[in-house]
Image (cartoon, helix red, strand yellow):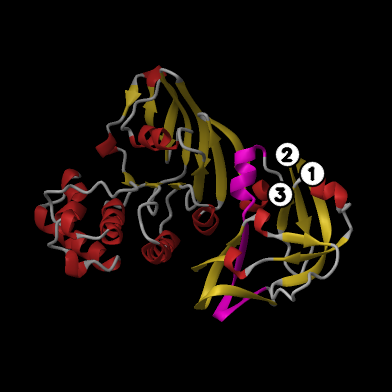
């Protein structure tokens, strides 16, 4: 398997300029997040060779793939990069088996060998019984499984995942997320994930890169970005509180602390809570809300028209209030407070 990725991607279009430097060590996953129009898909296309660089270079495992200054451009099919797009991008006239075998055949594998390997990968993603079906006869989740199998079947040196879950329903998304995590655990090449979903980024990535208007505005772990967001978008996105726990019915236990959730679930789950969904009180809230507890303020960070309050245990969370509320409640580091969260504001997915 290859080494890592080292790239500086410069793509210039009328009204848009993408300039991104990116390094991904082998066996690591980097998630790129950003608003629409930030340049995420252009970055994927440039790394895959679908869009040539105007300046910069792309090196994968020590092999130079693109360097316009040196007259180097390796065609997409020779880059050994597996790509899974958000809509699958399957060939409509080919069966599932033939779609997965396509890359192998393009790489020179005999037809019988390509079909054998394709069948093994379809089995690995739970799609053996759909091998003869064309994309039109598949659900969104099934088509995406075939797309993953096609991307992995060629034993690529790198994986590019361009919003691979965005078109799926919640149930399909959770199942595919688990499947992809299992396969990534045994894959030693660098991986780049494009996503809008902070839960996906937190679950699958080792490092996050925030891309806005064609440039990287911040890079780091989820906690680093959550605690010190460098832009309003980063604050909105990475400010989401991520909780890993075990559900039993409508109960959720996180680090020994019990919460009530809106939907009954069982087993390991991932829960997210937006900072604005957390209420801060100076006294124990009335009406006995089931998700309330006493804590203290650890940090107070000001971000333009909002104030982010980072709290101590039993659950270390980030809440958000207006500057007026922070002033009127005199919310300062060390101040004792009560937090409360409605069960409906705790969004839970199977982990």
- Nearer to us of marks 3 and 2 is 2
The image quadrant that residue 272 belongs to is bottom right
Question: In the rendered view, does 342 fall on the left or right side of 146?
Answer: right
How far apart are the alpha carbons under marks 3 and 2? 17 Å
Mark 3 packing: few (<14 Cα in 10 Å), some, or many (20+)? some
From this view, report whether residue 55 is shown above or below residue 317.
above
Question: In the rendered view, does 62 fall on the left or right side of 109?
Answer: right
How far apart are the alpha carbons under marks 2 and 1? 7 Å
Residue drawn at x 51%, y 43% is 33
Residue bearing the label numbered 2:
305
Q: Which residues are magenta?
A: 230-254
Number of marks present in the image shown = 3
Nearest the camera: 237 or 211?
A: 237
Is residue 236 covered in magenta? yes
Q: Is residue 93 visible?
A: yes
Give x and y (percent) for residue 132: 12, 62
Helix, strand, or loop for circle 2? loop
Residue bearing the label numbered 3:
227
> Are dots 2 and 1 in contact, CB under 8 Å?
yes
Question: In the rendered view, does 134 fall on the left or right side of 289?
Answer: left
- Nearer to us of marks 1 and 3 is 1
List the single residue furthest toward the front: 287
Residue drawn at x 38%, y 20% is 68
């Amino acid at each position: 398997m290859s080494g890592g990725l080292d790239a500086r991607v410069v793509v210039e279009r009328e009204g848009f300029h993408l300039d991104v430097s990116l390094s991904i060590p082998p066996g690591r996953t980097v998630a790129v997040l950003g608003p629409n129009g930030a340049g995420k898909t252009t970055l994927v296309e440039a790394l895959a060779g679908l869009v040539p660089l105007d300046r910069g270079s792309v090196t994968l495992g020590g092999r130079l793939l693109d360097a316009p200054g040196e007259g180097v451009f390796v065609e997409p099919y020779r880059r050994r990069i597996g790509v899974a797009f958000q809509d699958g991008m399957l060939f409509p006239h080919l069966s599932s088996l033939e779609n997965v075998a396509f890359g192998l055949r393009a790489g020179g594998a005999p037809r019988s060998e390509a079909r054998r390997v394709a069948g093994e990968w379809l089995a690995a993603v739970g799609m053996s019984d759909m091998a003869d079906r064309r994309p039109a006869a598949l659900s969104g989740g099934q088509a995406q499984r075939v797309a993953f199998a096609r991307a992995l079947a060629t034993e690529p040196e790198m994986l590019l995942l361009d919003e691979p879950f965005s078109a799926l329903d919640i149930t399909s998304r959770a199942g595919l997320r688990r499947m992809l995590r299992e396969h990534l655990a045994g894959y030693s090449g660098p991986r780049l994930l494009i996503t809008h979903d902070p839960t996906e980024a937190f679950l699958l990535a080792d490092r996050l890169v925030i891309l806005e208007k064609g440039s990287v505005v911040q890079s780091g772990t989820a906690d680093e970005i959550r605690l010190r967001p460098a832009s309003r978008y980063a604050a909105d996105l990475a400010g989401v509180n991520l909780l890993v726990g075990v559900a039993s019915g409508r109960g959720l236990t996180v680090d020994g602390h019990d919460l009530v959730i809106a939907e009954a679930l069982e087993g390991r789950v991932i829960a997210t809570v937006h900072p604005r969904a957390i209420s801060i009180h100076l006294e124990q809230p009335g009406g006995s809300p089931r998700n309330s507890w006493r804590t203290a303020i650890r940090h107070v960070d000001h971000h333009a028209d909002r104030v982010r309050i980072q709290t101590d245990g039993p659950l270390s969370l980030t809440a958000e209030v207006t500057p007026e509320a922070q002033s009127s409640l005199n919310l300062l580091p060390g101040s004792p407070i009560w937090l409360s969260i409605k069960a409906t504001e705790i969004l839970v997915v199977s982990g």
